[in-house]
Image: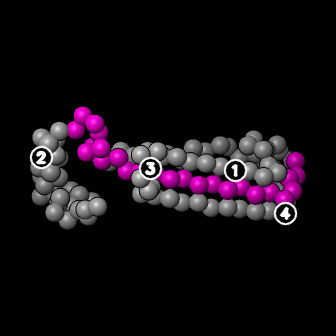
Amino acid sequence: MSGGRRPDLDFSTSVKAREVTFGKVPKKRKVTYYGEPDHETDAHVERENIPEEPEEGVTYRDVKVDWSVAQWIVHPAEDEDFEAEDVEREVEERRRRAAEGEPGVPPPEQMRKK
């Protein structure tokens, strides 16, 4: 994803158990990310000795689950239809929002450059 660029967020975790029995099968949950700027996400789950949908009351042994997520922030400048006027408009919008004291909106001068 994102043209070979390193992810802006790269997180992984693992869990192991000698055995696990579900008294009640948990509901599947989807991790959702939202907000601005837009983003691309790639998540993977690898399981050993436990199915994607475990059964209630069944004991699974020597279990391992690996979970990883990589996320890339997609800046409007990465859009192929992006024009210089769009940059000016975005900078002015950020300045306006920062001047109005909108939380979490630093002025463009304070934004880190890559």
Closer to the chain start, of discs 3 and 4, is 3
Q: Disc 4 marks which amino acid?
A: Arg
Crowding around mark 3 (Cα neighbors within 10 Å: few <14, some 14 to 19, many 20+) is few
Looking at the image, tell me whether mark 2 or mark 4 is earlier in sequence order.
Answer: 4
Badge 1: residue crowd in 10 Å (few <14, some 14–19, many ≥20): few
Q: Earlier in the sequence, mark 2 or mark 1?
A: 1
Does label 1 or label 3 sit earlier along the sequence?
3
Identify residue type, mark 3: Gly
**Residue 76 appears left or right of 22:** left
Task: Tell me the kind of residue under disc 2.
Answer: Glu
- Between tags 2 and 4, which lies in front? 2
How far apart are the alpha carbons under marks 2 and 1?
44 Å
Numbered disc in front, either 1 or 3:
3
**Circle 1 sits on which residue?**
46
Residue that badge 3 annotates: 4
- In the drawing, what numbered circle is on residue 18? 4
Q: What whole-number distance in Å separates the C-alpha atoms at marks 2 and 4?
A: 58 Å
- Start-end of magenta stretch: 58-82
In the picture, which quadrant includes the C terminus?
bottom left
| Residue in the image at 20% along x and 65% along y | 110
Residue position for label 2: 88
User: What label does residue 76 carry, if any?
Assistant: none
